[in-house]
Structures are given as C-alpha cells and as structure tokens.
Amino acid sequence: MRTAPEHSDLEDHRIELRIGINVGDVIVDDQGDIYGDGVNIAARVESLARPGAICLSDETYRQIKGKLAIDASDLGEHQLKNIAQSVRVYSVWLDDAPPLALPDKPSIAVLPFQNLSSDPTQEYFADGFSEDIITELTRFSDLFVIARNSSFKYKGKAVDLRQVGRELGVRYVLEGSIRRGDHRVRISAQLVDSGTGAHRWAERYDRELKDVFTIQDEVARTIAAVLAAHVNKAEAERTLLKPPATWQAYDYYTRAAAAWASFQSSWKLDQLLETRQHLADSLKIDPKYARAYSLLASTYRVAWLNPINEEHLTPAALDQSITLARTAIELDPNLPEAYAELGYNIIRKRDFDAATVAVERAIALNPNFADYRVAQVFYSVGQPTKAIEIAKTQMRLDPFHPHFAPLIAGIAYYLLKEHSEAQRWLREATGRAPNHQYGHAFLAATYAQLGRVEDARAEAAEVLRVNPKYTIGTQMRVSILKHAEDSDQLIDGLRKAGLPE
C-alpha cells in the first residue's frame, strides 16, 4: 500500500491522503527497505487517486470483489511509469470521504447510452449520440456539464446513479438506451436526481433514422429546460454543429474519436494511425465534415510535438495541422475546438496575437469550453493565472481528466515560480502519462528549482528514456513563451536538472 499527503489550504490545516493498494511480491533488503513490482505498482496507482480517495490495482480488486461492501469505479487501463504492462485501476468511494462540492448552477453528467441493437457495431452510434448531447448541453452557459471523458468511464457498467453523482459532483444524471433498426431508431432517456435517486423526467423517441439529429437537439433542449428554466433564449437559438452528410461518415468519426482516446492514454503509433484512417474514411464520404478536420489536425500536431514517428518536429507536420484546423473553421465557424486547435498550433509560429484571438473566439462561442489547448495559449502569452483557472475548470468538468490538464496547471505554476504547487500538479501528470516526455521535463526543472537534485536527475532520466534524442534546444522549439524571462526560467531549471543542451 502506498499513501501520499495532499495539503489543502493553510487556513484549515488539514492533510488529505491519497492511497494506492496493490497485491504482489515484495522484496525486503537488509536495511529494511522494500522494493519490487508489488511496491512500484502501488506507488503508481496512488498517483491516480483523488485526495481523500483510494485506488486499487486490478489484482487487488479481484481479491476483494464480492467480499467487501464497497463501491468501486473502473477507471480503465493505465500505462504506469516503469511498469511494462498496462494496469486496470479501480477507485473506491469512502463513505467518510467528502464528495465533490456541487456547483452553484444546475449540474449534469450524461452517461453513455446503452446499445440495445442486435448489432454490436452500433456501439459507435450510441456513443456518438451521447457525445452530441454533451456537446449541445455545454452551449448553455447556465449549466455545468461533465466532460465526455469522465462520463464515459461508466460505459458498460451497472452503476448506482447516486454514486455517480458523488464521484462527479453533479445533481443530475442522464442515462438512456438506443435501439437502431434498418430505417428507424428508438431512443429512451431519463433524468435522475443523483441526491435522492428520484426520476425527474423520462421520454421515448421513435423516429426515422434520417431525423435523428432533430431528436438529439430535442433531447438536449428538453433536459436544459428541466434543469435551468431561465436559460438564455439566445443560446437556445444556437447554431448546431453541422452534421455529416451520411451516417456512414458519422460512424467513422466516432470510431476515430474512440481510437484517439485510447492513443492519448497509450501513446502508441498504431492507435494514432487508426485514428487517421477512420477520419480519412469519414472525409471520403463527407468532405465537408468540420469536426473530422479538427480531430485530424490534432493527430498531426501531436506527431509534431512527440517522438512517435518521423513527423516529429518536421515543419510539414505542423503546417498540415494548422491547415486542417483552418479548414475546419472555414467549414464550421462555430466550432470551438477548431479555434482551440488553431491557437495551440500557431503559437509555435510565435504568432501570439493571432493565437490569443483564436482561443478567445473559442470561449466566446461556448463559455463552458475549458480546454488545455486554450490554457496553454494563455500561459504562453504571459497569463499563467488565467491558464491555471482554465485547466482547473477542465479538471472539474472532467474529474477523470487526462494528464494534459494537470500538466498545463503545473507549467503555469512553474512560470509563476510557485514550484511546490507546480510539483504537485506535474507529479499527477507524469503518473497519468509516464511515456509523455514533457511532463517529466517540467517536473525535472521544478525539482531542480526546489533544490531536490536527486529527484531532478531521476526525472531527467525519464525524459531520456522516453526520448533519447531530447535536448533543451528541442524543448524550447515547442515550449514557445512570449516573454524572455519565462524562457530563461525554464532553461535554467532544465540545465540544473542535468538535461543535455
């Protein structure tokens, strides 16, 4: 078992613990030190736990399942630092652990709709429908909507909706099912008060398949009316995301989104290429599908940033990403993620003003849009405090967030020279994505500034494990900072950590 303290505000002087538990062989040496995979996995699992919570490895959970009266949520498989095989992790809810505080406005999580069709390949249809409802609901500024990543952690699981409400910190949970035939679709949805378990609203829709986008908008509007009676009328008249020309193109897009989510956890080339192939198939059918272009831009951006294939740091890959993001905006000027992708990429060209305009446009289109790409643009132009606010908002909207949000928060704190706080967030980021070089690099610099030389050297070694060709020079090609003092501070930390020039 591994525990780590998390310090809350000094005003209440509390110490909150995160606990990781694993079952396995442990080696004890003559000095009483313990080591081995049994200990290492517990340490890595601990980094995935929220303060005040417990995370279990798959092996631990199998041994207690059905024997102890505990609630456990499946967090999926994680590639843990220095562990060869991925490990499935479970989060345990403790009755005395504080639930996430409810926001001061109506809050909702949309769970993945169940696929009741006889064809299992229709999972993508059901997933895409759930994701579209989430997208539509986020357009209402009077609602607090949990991000897809966290909602989809409950996919395929029998869950207590009251537990979902506690874990995600929301008042309402939407669940439903889809049964799709040759030309018709039946959609059932129900809204549950997670505090009491009471059903607040339920409806069933039987429609021809060609009308399914109308159904999706109708469901989103109805739920919004139940949750926020005073939703701004102008927002209710919002422009919908442009649907693809055919359902085949849409199916390919949702397959690409699933592959992309897997890639962001594993960083495996085959999953990146699978994402691109599905997007190519989608665009072959519907060449004007803006969301597909935006996601395709992300695949070239991540290949430019990371040593995944031969596209790493090649001008063509970055230019391709920028071109694709601009194409998405031309096809749909109301797509926030396309503006976020554009800003995140053109900052690498040192076009600070245009990047700021792009991400501010994303926020103007959807005030609920909190994305790490937007946050990075703000710390790059010298507004780290605003970057932290956006990153923390993303983490609250997505309690099972990927590592990018804490990574951005950690970098922004580093630039503010709040190194103890930076270390906290960067440790979380590297725990969630041990094969991402930049998290280790910033953590190495942070430890160096704190005077923790051995820890800094260990993180520097992790950087070189992931990318043996890493240099401070290449780091500064991607970590573009407007103000020279910010760049100097980063270079200083990287040098102190012992990373090569």
Image (cartoon, rainbow, N blue to C red):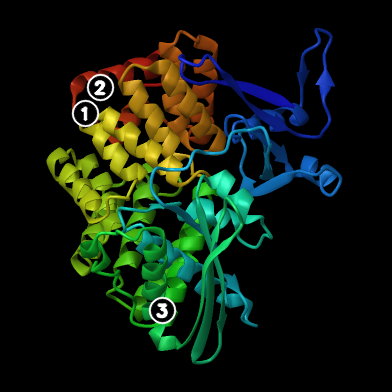
* Residue type for callout 1: Gly
Q: Position of residue 117 (x, y in %)?
A: 61, 81
Question: Quadrant of the rendered structure where residue 139 is?
Answer: bottom left
Query: Viewer-proximal residue, 405 or 27?
Result: 405
Circles 2, 1 touching at the beta carbon (< 8 Å): yes
Q: Nearer the viewer, mark 2 or mark 1?
A: 1
Mark-to-mark CA distance, 2 and 3: 50 Å
Q: Position of residue 38 (x, y in %)?
A: 77, 30
Q: Is residue 372 above or below residue 256?
A: above
Residue ID for mark 3 = 215
Query: Viewer-proximal residue, 179 or 40?
Result: 179
Would residue 37 appear left or right of 177 to someone viewing this image?
A: right
Q: How many marks are shown on the rendered structure?
A: 3
Would residue 202 appear left or right of 334 to someone viewing this image?
A: right
Residue at position x 46%, y 8% from top?
A: 451
Q: Quadrant of the C terminus?
A: top left
Residue ID for mark 2 = 486
Mark-to-mark CA distance, 3 and 1: 44 Å
* Residue type for callout 2: Asp
Q: Quadrant of the N terminus?
A: top right
